[in-house]
Image (cartoon, rainbow, N blue to C red):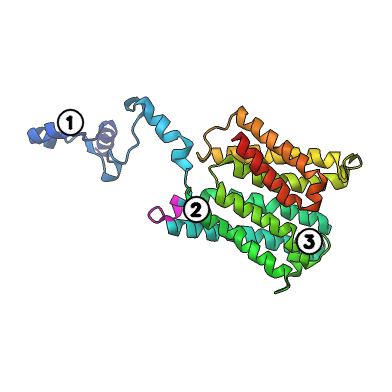
Amino acid sequence: MYTKSFSLILSSPLIVDSPSSSSSSSSSSSSSSSSSSSLAVPCFFSPTSLKPSSASLPATYFHRYSHPRSLTSSLAALMSPENSVLSDVCATGISGVVAFSCLGFWGEIGKRGIFDQKLIRKLVHINIGLVFILCWPLFSSGLQGALFASLIPGLNIIRMLLLGLGVYQDEGTIKSMSRHGDRRELLKGPLYYALSITSACIFYWKTSPIAIAVVCNLCAGDGMADIVGRRLGTEKLPYNRNKSVAGSIGMAIAGFLASVAYMYYFASFGYIENSGWDMILRFFIISVASALVESLPISTDIDDNLTVSLTSALVGTLLF
């Protein structure tokens, strides 16, 4: 008896009332009450909660909802979809923790003397800016998001000023961000570094390829120029004996590869529409131009953190 009843349940079709069938069932209530062999679908399997089948959908459905912009254009909406200000505040907190944790990590490395001070300085140079722009998709896309994001390098500007002026001491930070362990060095290169990233954040933001070019050539490019130059730079440039051929080539390659990687990263969120070969070629031209300017004696006299950033921004403005 139970076996027969169980087989009857398994053989019974699942009936989901559609709008058309509901009208017919209301006119003939006797037929709906007499269908005892059919199972009613529970409310959590209602048509509104079921994903439509591909056979009943127009072709535009898949294009509309599978586009990267529709899926991941704003990670900030996951934190507070109803309040963009609160969402950007949360994004600022998360990004700040990430950025200052990286600074703290390299500071501890500097205190313990695990690596050479000059190597640590360049690893900080490469790491901080690239990690920071990884967090940009957390913010909203407008000016509000750019201003909130710029607070993080902006606070670092204040920090460099206070450390450089001797208002307070942080031995680890001074060692990890200066050439010779002198706090006054923070008022030059590290301060210009923070100013450049802050400016790129405010004036270009994540929808502009120029911001990618500025940050990637400043961080990855200029950082690798020193690392490669110190290890492989036996052949010096004829017009600047302080720079090497290997260092300039390493800078151009590192800045270019980082730019392309971040181009695809931001394109995956829908912030950059065109990510084809023409844009890759433009990034290559910007990286070569930045490496060329960095190799000039003027970059030593002023500061390569300024000259590289300005070159990337100016050439990027012409190309984009």
Q: Earlier in the sequence, mark 2 or mark 3?
A: 2
> Marks 3/1: CA distance?
75 Å
Please tell me how crowded label 2 is: few (under 14), some (14-19), or many (20+) other residues with Cα within 10 Å.
many
Report whether 53 appears left or right of 4.
right
Q: Position of residue 270 (x, y in %)?
A: 50, 39
Disc 2 residue type?
Answer: Gly
Location of residue 78 in the rendering, given as x and y in whole percent from the top left corner: 44, 51
The answer to if 82 sits in the magenta stretch is yes
Q: Which residue occupies 72% across, 70% down? A: 165
Disc marking residue 20: 1
Q: Residue at x 27, y 41 (%)?
A: 46
Q: Given this view, does label 3 or label 1 mark the residue nearer the observer?
A: 3
Q: Which residues are magenta?
A: 77-84
Q: Nearer the viewer, mark 1 or mark 2?
A: 2
At a point 21% along the width and 35% down the height, the residue shown is: 17
Q: Amino acid at mark 1?
A: Ser
Which residue is identified by label 3? 178
Q: Are marks 1 and 2 in contact (CB under 8 Å)?
A: no
Q: Secondary structure at mark 1?
A: helix
Foreground pick, 28 / 139: 139
| Amino acid of disc 3 | Ser
Earlier in the chain: of badge 1 and badge 2, it is 1
